[in-house]
C-alpha cells in the first residue's frame, strides 16, 4: 500500500532513539540520590556522578526528536486547511490531560506521605500545576506545551526563504539572547522555559525539513560528532569549575565558553544518538532480534514510562531504602531496573485500554 502524498513515511528506527533517551531519563532520576549520598572524591560518588551528569542530554534529546518529527510530518500540510486545529486538538489534548492527571496523582501521594490532607490544598495544587512542580519531572510538560503553542507559527515561517535558509542560526541567536538576558535579569526556573532549548529544537526542525539530505551528511561526519560529544561532555562535567575560576575576570568570555560547551555537548549527543539509531535500526536483526523488539517496545511507550517511573522510584525509596543501607549502590541499580521494567509493563497494559490515553497519552 503506497504512502499518501501528504504523509511522509514513518521513520521506524526513531523508536530506538526514544528507548535510549527514556532509559537515560530513568537513570538520571535513579542515580540522583546516590550522587547526594556518597562523599565526594570517592569511587562510588564519581561513578554515579559520571552517569548522572553525562545522561543529562536526555531531556534535550526528547525535545530535539519532538521538533524533528513535527516538522518532518507537518511540513507537507502547510497548504492544507484546518491542519492547525487538528494539530492542537491532537497534541494539546493528549499531552495536557495526562499532565493534569499525573500532577494530581503525585500531589496527592506526596501529601499522603507527609500526613496532610490533599483536598485542603487545592490552591497549592493549582500553583504547582501552573509551574510544573507537582513532581520533579513534570517541568518537561511546560516546555513541550510551550513548543506546541509556537510550533504552527514557526512552521509558517519556513515558507520564507530568508528564514529557512539560515534556520539554525536564528535559533542559536535566540537562545544566546535569552542566556544573556537571564544573566542580567535572572528569570528563575529557566529549565522550564522553552528559550533554554531553542538550539536543539531549531536543529531538530532543520533535520525534519531536510531529513534525508542531513542524515547522509551526518553519517559522513559521525566521527566528528562523536569527538564533539566526548569533548563537550568532558569539559562540561569536569572543567566547568576550572573555567569559572580562571575566567572570572572576563565574565563575557566565561559565559560564552560555558554556553558553547554545554550546547556542543547536548546537540552532539542528540545527533550521535540519531546516527546510532539509524545504524542499528536499519541493519539486519539476527541474534539481537529479541533485544531489538524490547527496545522498540520501550520507545513506543516512552511517554508512559516517563510519566510512571518516578512513582516506582518513590515507592522503592519509601519501602526498600533501609533494606539496602549496607549495599546502597546495589539498591540504586536495582531501583533503576525496577523503575524501567515496571513502568514499561504498566504503560504497555494501559496502552491496551480504551481510556489508557488519559494516563499515558497517545
Image (cartoon, rainbow, N blue to C red):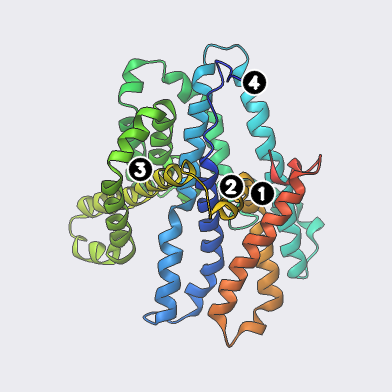
Q: Is residue 101 visible?
A: yes
Q: Nearer the viewer, residue 271 or 106?
A: 271
Using the numbered discs, state the Cα–Cα distance from disc 3 to disc 4 in whole angstroms: 34 Å
Residue wearing tag 3: 181
Using the numbered discs, state the Cα–Cα distance from disc 2 to disc 4 in whole angstroms: 31 Å
For residue 304, which numbered disc appears in the image? Answer: 1
Crowd band around label 4 with a 10 angstrom C-alpha radius: few (<14), some (14–19), many (20+): few
The reply to whether dot 1 and dot 2 touch (C-beta < 8 Å) is: no
User: Tag 2's secondary structure?
Assistant: helix
Residue 82 point in image, percent of width and height: 63, 15
Using the numbered discs, state the Cα–Cα distance from disc 1 to disc 2 in whole angstroms: 14 Å
Among numbered discs 1 and 2, the one appearing first in the sequence: 2
Image quadrant occupied by the N terminus: top right
In percent of the image, x 68 and y 78: which residue is there?
320
User: Tag 4's secondary structure?
Assistant: helix
Residue wearing tag 2: 296
Using the numbered discs, state the Cα–Cα distance from disc 3 to disc 1 in whole angstroms: 35 Å
Crowd band around label 1 with a 10 angstrom C-alpha radius: few (<14), some (14–19), many (20+): many
In percent of the image, x 27 and y 48: which residue is there?
223
Residue 45 point in image, percent of width and height: 43, 77
Among numbered discs 3 and 2, the one appearing first in the sequence: 3
In percent of the image, x 35 and y 21: which residue is there?
163
Using the numbered discs, state the Cα–Cα distance from disc 1 to disc 4 in whole angstroms: 25 Å
Amino acid at each position: 500500500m503506497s504512502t499518501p502524498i501528504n504523509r511522509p513515511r514513518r521513520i521506524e528506527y526513531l523508536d530506538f532513539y526514544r528507548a535510549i533517551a527514556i532509559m537515560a531519563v530513568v537513570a538520571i532520576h535513579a542515580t540522583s540520590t546516590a550522587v547526594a549520598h556518597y562523599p565526594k572524591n570517592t569511587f562510588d560518588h564519581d561513578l554515579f556522578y559520571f552517569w548522572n551528569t553525562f545522561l543529562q542530554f536526555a531531556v534535550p534529546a526528547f525535545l530535539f526528536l519532538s521538533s524533528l518529527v513535527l516538522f518532518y510530518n507537518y511540513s507537507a500540510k502547510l497548504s492544507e486547511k484546518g491542519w492547525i486545529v487538528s494539530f492542537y486538538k491532537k497534541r494539546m489534548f493528549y499531552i495536557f490531560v495526562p499532565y493534569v492527571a499525573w500532577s494530581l496523582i503525585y500531589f496527592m501521594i506526596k501529601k499522603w506521605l507527609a500526613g496532610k490532607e490533599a483536598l485542603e490544598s487545592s490552591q497549592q495544587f493549582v500553583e504547582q500545576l501552573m509551574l510544573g512542580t507537582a513532581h520533579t519531572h513534570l517541568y518537561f510538560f511546560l516546555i513541550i506545551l510551550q513548543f506546541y503553542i509556537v510550533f504552527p507559527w514557526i512552521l509558517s515561517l519556513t515558507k520564507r526563504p530568508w528564514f529557512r535558509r539560515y534556520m539554525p542560526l536564528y535559533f542559536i541567536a535566540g537562545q544566546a539572547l535569552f542566556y544573556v538576558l537571564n544573566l542580567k535579569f535572572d528569570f528563575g526556573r529557566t529549565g522550564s522555559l522553552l528559550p533554554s532549548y531553542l538550539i536543539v529544537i531549531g536543529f531538530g526542525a532543520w533535520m525534519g525539513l531536510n531529513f534525508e539530505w542531513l542524515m547522509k551528511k551526518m553519517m559522513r561526519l559521525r566521527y566528528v560528532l562523536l569527538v564533539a560529544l566526548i569533548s563537550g561532555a568532558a569539559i562540561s562535567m569536569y572543567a566547568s569549575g576550572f573555567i569559572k575560576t580562571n575566567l572570572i575576570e572576563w565574565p563575557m568570555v566565561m559565559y560564552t565558553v560555558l554556553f558553547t560547551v554545554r550546547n556542543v555537548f547536548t546537540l552532539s549527543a542528540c545527533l550521535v544518538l540519531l546516527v546510532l539509531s539509524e545504524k542499528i535500526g536499519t541493519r539486519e536483526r539476527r541474534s539481537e532480534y529479541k533485544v531489538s523488539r524490547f527496545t522498540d517496545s520501550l520507545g513506543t511507550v516512552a511517554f508512559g514510562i516517563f510519566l510512571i517511573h518516578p512513582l516506582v522510584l518513590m515507592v522503592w525509596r519509601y519501602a526498600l531504602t533501609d533494606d539496602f543501607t549496607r549495599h546502597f549502590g546495589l539498591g540504586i541499580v536495582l531501583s533503576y531496573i525496577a523503575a524501567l521494567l515496571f513502568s514499561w509493563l504498566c504503560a504497555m497494559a494501559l496502552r491496551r485500554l480504551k481510556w489508557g490515553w488519559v494516563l499515558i497519552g497517545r
